[in-house]
Amino acid sequence: MAALDVDGLQRRLRAFADARDWTRFHSPKNLAMAVASEAGELVDVFQWLTEEESRHLSDENLQRATEEIADVLIYLLRLGDQLGIDFGKAIDEKIELNERKYPVDLGKGNSTKYNRRE
Amino acid sequence: MAALDVDGLQRRLRAFADARDWTRFHSPKNLAMAVASEAGELVDVFQWLTEEESRHLSDENLQRATEEIADVLIYLLRLGDQLGIDFGKAIDEKIELNERKYPVDLGKGNSTKYNRRE
Amino acid sequence: MAALDVDGLQRRLRAFADARDWTRFHSPKNLAMAVASEAGELVDVFQWLTEEESRHLSDENLQRATEEIADVLIYLLRLGDQLGIDFGKAIDEKIELNERKYPVDLGKGNSTKYNRRE
Amino acid sequence: MAALDVDGLQRRLRAFADARDWTRFHSPKNLAMAVASEAGELVDVFQWLTEEESRHLSDENLQRATEEIADVLIYLLRLGDQLGIDFGKAIDEKIELNERKYPVDLGKGNSTKYNRRE
């Protein structure tokens, strides 16, 4: 059910940019900046909340978070389109890398190890 | 073909975190921070490149960009899971909002308007 | 005692970049990206810590935070140099703006107001 | 002339937060988030500009950039205050580290080396 139609969305976003003559602004460099600036807005939703409050967002904050997550995803979809990246494959490979890097026995409850992830 | 199995990936990432006892670190607040820190690493790939260079990445930089995009997606998937967000719906609504906000006639080739998006 | 010699540091950073032929990479656009990518590394230090833990950093994390703060400052100094910005004046004006925006009586203990700062 | 009165500004920002009962929100973790979210707004000013345009900002964009730089600095000042960091010393040490890491002969005009800075 909850599958994301990456191809269809990228086509739609491409048409959206083309119709407005914005494609020339959408270099990978600029799109990476847009991802970061939207990620900054996402952080803005949470920065004065406690972790506990962040688990029980008000309707208003949930709406804001949802919109900022959508914005980050939209620019990631554009960026992946421009760079020809296969999201499913990229995520699979990263999860497999993490599974090798953080074996279950060693990592259990150890945030330090997690934090030192690179 | 290029559909992302959001449900399946979220299940897998949930199991990954649970097995390592990391779920308690994965408050929405912390996951939003992780999205921003990975977005910062994505920007790091592009910051000294020209826009033109960013359109023709070396194999090494494409690999780095792919991994950072995967990292941002992974934390977004976790965050969306914790907040119960429907990605497809969120993106659709955001695109529709943008279509109303930037009608084709007015926006054509106008980056200023784009920039003032909020 | 704790005054920052902005002019002297900017001269030194300019010489550092010039000696390495890096000045051509230091457009304001690129330096803004560098600020964001270092800010992402700063967030990385704190993302799995509780707020309480962040108030009592280990020596190692304090060292990491100090280095990332220095990195953000270094790129801000370069950016301010390129744009000709007077930091003291800019901060003064922003504080005065905030004093008008958040009068003491209304803002007391109200993080929501704070959060809605723009 | 252009020295920044770090002590004085930190005292003023501390009083500002205390008067509004906001100090309890200002954990190092939250302040690091605020730095990142303001850095995201700084990136937002530049993301659709070319590098060349970023060297010749319009008055409006220069004003926006100045305000966002001030915001990043304000939260860095608060964060440094909470963590007891000596900015001048931290920057000096980081520049010295960079001087050892990127000797002039090797680094000349080499952005790749720069990029691989950690």
Image (spheres, coloured by chain):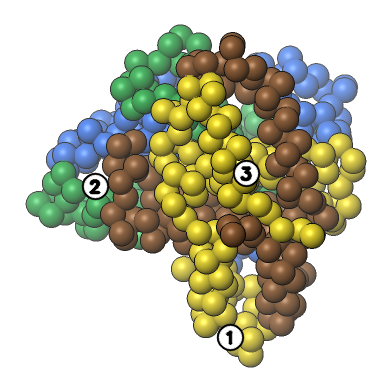
Chain colours: A blue, B green, C yellow, D brown
* Residue found 53% across the figure and 49% down from its top: D39
Give how far apart the Cα atoms at labels 2 and 3 are: 35 Å
Residue at 55% across / 32% down in the picture? C15
Which residue is depicted at the point 89% across and 43% down? C58
Residue most toward the bottom? C105
Badge 3 amino acid: Leu
Q: Tell which subunit mark 1 falls on.
A: C
Query: In the rendered image, is residue B41 in sight?
Result: yes
Residue D31 rendering spot, x and y as whole percentages = 68, 57
Q: Is residue B60 above or below residue B23?
A: above
Q: Are marks 1 and 3 on the same chain?
A: yes
Per the image, label 3 sits on a secondary structure element best described as helix
Chain letter of the residue beneath label 2 in the structure image? B
Where does label 3 land, which residue?
A: C9
Q: In front here: C33 or C88?
A: C88
Image location of residue C31, percent across then percent down: 48, 39
B42 in relation to B35, above or below: above
Asked if disc 2 and disc 3 are in contact, CB closer than 8 Å, the reply is no
Q: Quadrant of residue B1?
A: top left
Q: Amino acid at mark 2?
A: Ser
Q: Is residue A50 above or below residue A115?
A: below
For this orientation, the residue located farthest to the front is D1
The CA span between labels 1 and 2 is 36 Å
Residue D80: image location, x then y, percent: 75, 55
Cα gap from disc 1 to disc 3, whole angstroms: 35 Å
> Looking at the rendered structure, which numbered label has been put on residue C103?
1
Instruction: Provide the chain ID for the residue under circle 3.
Output: C
Say which residue label 2 marks.
B111
Q: Secondary structure at mark 2?
A: helix
Image height of A88 relative to B91, above or below: above
